[in-house]
Image: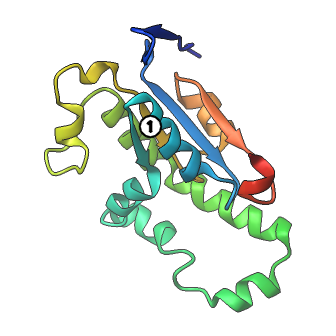
Amino acid sequence: MSTYVIRPINNTMTEIINPKIFITGIPTAGKTYLSRKLAKATGGYCLETDALRDELVKDPKYNKWENFFDEKNEYAYYTDNDPEEQWRLLSEQHEQLWPGVLKKIREYGSGHIPLKSIIAGYLRKPLSKKRPIIFEGINILPRLAKKDLDFPGVVLIGKSLEEVL
């Protein structure tokens, strides 16, 4: 895994040599909150992987997994399945979606950003290579990230945002 360095510039800015990081964790752990705060503090951009998944729904090989929970009765799902089974199903969904999510992370991370992307103009501004991209989402499973991503990350684990922070 690569490392990243944060060093002061003009006492008010930071430069991240490796401009990519991921933030993942359990539902409601504060992933989005932390990634948006970090993006604001560093002048970077938070790319929520849920938005990447919206693109995957168009691909037939991912459609079943992207819509997996949409077709279920939410009340029955949570009452009929214990937490271990819920985690197993969630993990299975993310493992099946991972090749597509990983492809998008690599495209965005290397600067191959679709022109219609909401971040295209932002990342193509002058000095954009110094702007970090924070990939955030529950579907970045730690074991898959460790195996496939070449940049550091954070995993948030706790019952709530308050407990994590």
Q: Position of residue 142 (x, y in %)?
A: 67, 39
Q: Residues within 10 Å of mark 1 (few under 14, many from 20)?
A: some
Q: Nearer the viewer, residue 131 or 103?
A: 131
Task: Tell whether 157 sits left or right of 38.
Answer: right
Q: Where is residue 12 in the image (x, y as percent from the top left)?
A: 43, 17
Q: Position of residue 96 (x, y in %)?
A: 55, 55
Q: Where is residue 43 in the image (x, y as percent from the top left)?
A: 37, 31
Q: What element carries label 1?
A: helix
Query: Could you say which quadrant of the image residue 82 lies in?
Result: bottom right
Question: Which quadrant is the N terminus positioned in?
Answer: top right
Q: Name the residue under label 1.
A: 39
Question: Which residue sits at x=45%, y=58%?
Answer: 50
Question: Which residue sits at x=15%, y=51%?
Answer: 116
Tell how many labels: 1
- Give the farthest residue toward the left: 115
Is residue 102 placed above or below 61 in the rendered structure?
above
